[in-house]
Amino acid sequence: MRAHLGDRLVIESPATGAARRDGEIVGLHHEDGTPPYDVRWSDTDEVTLVFPGPDAHIRHVGHGPPRPPGGPSRPDPGEARAGSAAAPSAGTPNPGDIGRRVADERRRHGLSREQAARRARMSPEYLAYLEEQPADPTAATLIRLADALGTTVSALRGGGADLPPGQGRALAHPRLLDLDVRECRALLSTHGVGRVAVSAPDGRPAVVPVNYEVVEDAIAFRTAPDSVPAAAVGKEVAFEVDHVDEAMSEGWSVLAVGPAQVVTEPDAVRRLTQGAHATPWAGGEREMWVSIRPTTLTGRRITPADQ
């Protein structure tokens, strides 16, 4: 008997063959996947050390059976079970949607895997498996992860991805705080996606999301010469970035106003391109860098009144 992290241990009735109990394998004690295992039981959510008997078998989740001792710890792509996706090669992360969301939330909170795993009461190895492989964690596991990362199970599963943020219940006693320039700069420097407000070529106002960078005192984004964001060049524009914490009904926003110019100096363009934290999500040829140097910088934050 050999298993991977995330597989399920099923114990059957010797009389009927029906499953009497099952749980998620969250800890391995041998590199070749042989028993014993740390199992989180689905009926109690408790983790126990298990030496499986003859009435137990492994249900493999999303990958083929482990190799015998001495072989790679993960199967080759050709060893995936019929009807399942090809398994990743050894050491190659192949995260599912849940894994990507978990890893993103963990990094956003500045947590190491060990810190996040301790908060979620699971092994760091199992958290690594969730983040790097297309796992299907139990509801109990997702609840603990959501609580540890300050988010919701729905958010980790991708629920509401097509809905605008902020539809949750407002705080009973909110407090609206003005942010000083230092706080605004710190929040802007997280990079990510912001919104630039411009007058489009047809004269109508437009607000467009862009991937942006902060370099020294300037906000820079990459676009195409014939795009709507490119209309910002040579004008005073507004740039806004914000974050909404649905679970806590809190959030902040920062507004920068200033002139926008094309970055033309070759060395500056090269530094921006090489140091970019992300490529434009919109894709396509977007090699024109636009720089906004704020003349005013303001922001607000919503928190509970008792904080």
Image (tube, grey):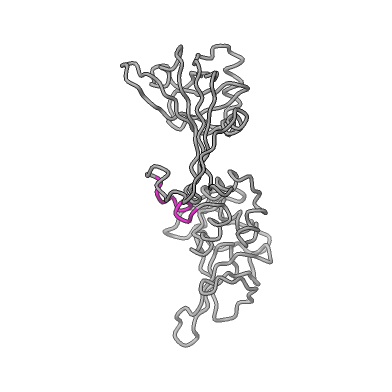
Quadrant where the N terminus sits is: bottom right
Foreground residue, 2 or 305? 305
Which quadrant of the figure has residue 127? Answer: bottom right
Q: Is residue 208 left or right of residue 143?
A: left
Foreground residue, 36 or 88? 36
Q: Going by the picture, which residue comes out furthest to the bottom?
A: 15
Foreground residue, 214 or 77? 214
Foreground residue, 172 or 222? 172
**Total count of labels:** 0
Which quadrant of the figure has residue 27? Answer: bottom right
Was residue 158 drawn as part of the magenta stretch in this picture? yes
Residue in view at x 42 percent, y 44 percent:
166
Residue in view at x 54 percent, y 47 percent:
305
Relative to 28, residue 49 above or below:
below
Relative to 120, residue 229 above or below:
above
Relative to 266, residue 112 above or below:
below
Looking at the rendering, the stretch of residues picked out in magenta corresponds to 152-161
Residue 23, position as x, y percentages in the image: 54, 71
Residue in view at x 47 percent, y 49 percent:
171
Residue 132, position as x, y percentages in the image: 57, 51
Residue 113, position as x, y percentages in the image: 64, 52
Residue in view at x 52 percent, y 19 percent:
292
Was residue 185 drawn as part of the magenta stretch in this picture? no
Residue 207, position as x, y percentages in the image: 39, 27
Which quadrant of the figure has residue 208? Answer: top left
